[in-house]
Image (cartoon, rainbow, N blue to C red):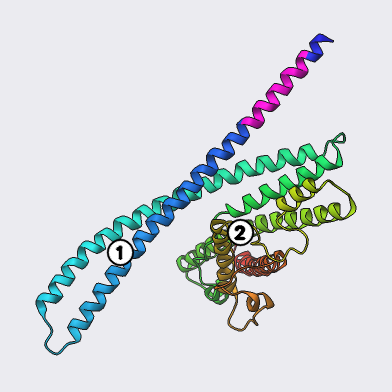
Amino acid sequence: MKTLKFIFIIISILIISSLNLQAQAIQNAESRYSRLQYDLKFEQSKLDSLKNIFNGRVKKIDEEKSKKNSNKDVITNLMSGSISITHEIDLEQKKVDGIEKNLENVKRELSKIYSEKIDSLQEAETKTNISVEESNKLKAEVFSFIEKKMMVAPKTSLLSFNPEKIAAIDLKKINDPQEKDIYKDYLQNALAEVDDRLSNVNGTISELNQIITLQKKTKRFLEETEFETNIQQQSASATTSTQAVPDYYNGKTSDAKAELSSQVQDYNLLLGQLRQPSDGKVKWENNYDPKNPNLTLKQYQNLLKELKKKLLEYKLIINNKLGPAK
């Protein structure tokens, strides 16, 4: 009996230690992420200022050159000063690029940590001996970490290939073996890019669906169960206003809003790249305003569904073009 009690104590200590280490890892990574965000803003501001100064000098040079009696000394001085500014811009750009690279690395680290935390919380929720109250608190925590994971999603870049060029390629009509190999490589690289974007979009869709499901569960739970006021407030706060879900930006900090807006814009630009000129504009695009990018979860979901559809279409096109040539 004493042995069992001792084992139970040891297991409890190990679990608590593991949770503490996990919490510390999250805190450390989030601190580095916040610091890098601050550094990026600071250095980007310096870079923008230098570019503005350079553009101002270029404008003055053009104005001086356009004069009938232009002053060569003035032009020479302006051009000389512009060279040093160009050098500063290059150095500052390298700083910005370095911070952005580090930021992406920390994002990947946070995404992994958040995934592990979500898995452990969901595992804890499956225990049959927890109360309904505890289950709801776990749902709220899961919701919070899924949102955090979405905000550190990897940057979605445009495709390097031209979708219209893909549509025009026909390997069966190319007789030159060397030329055919070049176009096959082009198609295979395009296919790899499409798969990469699809993986990114599928991950975001999965997380978004979990958020929507948890919101519905929490809302239903709050409607059907009477709780003390403090518990209701905690749940409502953790699920970012589940009642009407007016938009996905409610309660977010300015940095989080900027991150989400950037993600939405990236996805929207990618969708625009994949549309052929003959395509009609989907309803989503009419709802999207870059100056006011706040959106509902449903709108975000519609954007991702449309983007996934387009990516799958291009994957099918590329596979069909590669298939007969294999």
In which quadrant of the rendered image does the C terminus lie?
bottom right
**Depicted 69 relative to depicted 202: above or below:** below
Q: Which residue lies furthest to the front in this view?
A: 229
Q: Nearer the viewer, residue 305 or 74?
A: 74
| Three-letter code for the amino acid on which mark 1 is drawn | Leu
Is 126 situated left or right of 155 in this image?
A: right
- Secondary element under disc 1, as helix, strand or loop, is helix
Q: Earlier in the sequence, mark 1 or mark 2?
A: 1
**Depicted 278 relative to depicted 137: above or below:** below
Q: Residue 50 got which mark? A: 1
Marks 1, 2: nearer the viewer: 1
**Depicted 326 relative to depicted 119: above or below:** below
Identify the image quadrant of residue 87: bottom left
Measured as percent of width and height from the top left, residue 120 is found at 72, 38
Identify which residue is drawn at 48% across, 49% down: 103
Query: Is residue 7 covered in magenta?
Result: yes
| Three-letter code for the amino acid on which mark 2 is drawn | Asp
Is 85 situated left or right of 12 in this image?
A: left
Q: Can residue 170 be seen in this view?
A: no
Q: Main secondary structure of the magenta part?
A: helix
Measured as percent of width and height from the top left, residue 252 is found at 61, 57
Q: Check whether the beta carbons of the residues at disc 1 and disc 2 lie within 8 A of each other.
A: no
Q: Residue 195 got which mark? A: 2
Q: Which of 191 and 113 is in front in this view?
A: 113
- Secondary element under disc 2, as helix, strand or loop, is helix
**Depicted 164 relative to depicted 82: above or below:** below
**Residue stretch rendered in magenta on the structure:** 6-20
In which quadrant of the rendered image does the N terminus lie?
top right
Q: Judge the density around disc 2: few (<14), some (14-19), many (≥20) Cα neighbours within 10 Å.
A: some
Identify the image quadrant of residue 246: bottom right
